[in-house]
Image (tube, rainbow, N blue to C red):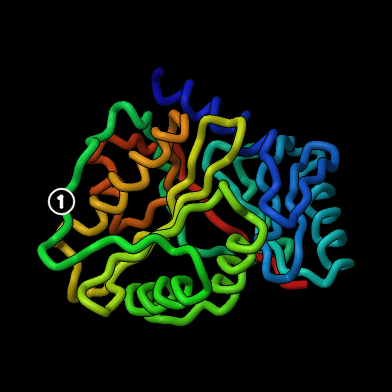
Amino acid sequence: MDHDDMLALFDNRIRRNTPPDPGCRVERDGAVVRQVGSEHSWNGVVWSGLDEAGADAAIAAQVRHFAGLGLEFEWKAYSHDRPADLGARLLAAGFTPEPDEALMLARIADLPAEAALPEGVRLLPVTDPAGVDLLMDAHTQAFGAENPRLRERLLDHLRHGVGTVSMVVAMAGDRPVSGARMELIPGTGFAGLWGGGTAPDWRGRGIYRALIAHRARLAAELGYEYLQVDASDQSRPILQRLGFAWVSTTTPYVRQP
């Protein structure tokens, strides 16, 4: 499968026909597909099939909808979306862009099956709130800021997402130094890899690659065929060396209620 075919499959299965996250619902409003949940959920537009004539009205309709619910939401735009000036239209409608990320896709069968952890580091599955606290500790070290909203989302996954989310933290002795999660999307063949941030003093030792391999093996055992990552500039080169393809660029546009 070439890159264009894989991107088309991703758009169809993960964006246009996405299943909802636990505790959320997916709604279709004309040429827009959105997810709506609680204030701790990811709320936003996952796909749009707009043209120049109707784009501004569709954007305004989503702003009104989420404002009526009192929810912040994200319009997850991709560089191959139409119209070509979608990003500029979102800015004009009061959205704030967050950093671009590379949409990386791979067939699990094409990826390395093993990657060694540094000596003294072990992987600990996250199965309870104490494990979430360890994962968030690693996240804070890696990204330099606490994220209480993400913590609530991960706890929601524990409560409602049985069988669809796998979380793991890399422990150096008693210290969490990296953490990641995998969101399984039933019926699509795709699993999404999220997180993977590592404490600065532990970077460059192979932990990120080991977390990719660990989650890839688990996804394959569960019958999944593809992995998806929204990659930063830091992780993109590593993923490309492992066999992921950079097929598009995604920009989150956030709108306050």
> Which residue is painted at 76% across and 60% down in the image?
37
The residue indicated by pointer 1 is 116
- State the residue in front, 90 or 125: 125
- Residue sitting at the far front: 128
> Which residue is painted at 47% across and 26% down in the image?
6
Where is residue 148? Give x, y as percent: 56, 79
Quarter of the image that includes the C terminus: bottom right
- State the residue in front, 249 or 40: 40
Residue 197 visible here? no
- Residue sitting at the far top: 1
The answer to whether residue 5 is above or below residue 7 is above
| Crowdedness near tag 1: few (<14), some (14–19) or many (≥20) residues, C-alpha within 10 Å | some
Quarter of the image that includes the N terminus: top left
The answer to whether residue 244 is above or below residue 116 is above
- State the residue in front, 207 or 56: 207
Where is residue 59? Give x, y as percent: 78, 52
Where is residue 93? Give x, y as percent: 74, 62
- State the residue in front, 194 or 93: 194
Secondary structure beneath label 1: loop
Where is residue 200? Give x, y as percent: 23, 74
- Residue sitting at the far right: 68
Residue 99 visible here? yes
Q: Quadrant of residue 216?
A: top left
Decide if residue 201 is on the left or right side of residue 256: left
Q: Amino acid at mark 1?
A: Ala
Decide if residue 151 is on the left or right side of residue 23: left
Q: Quadrant of residue 242?
A: top left
The answer to whether residue 188 is above or below residue 208 is above
> Which residue is painted at 41% across and 47% down in the image?
102
> Which residue is painted at 59% across and 48% down in the image?
77
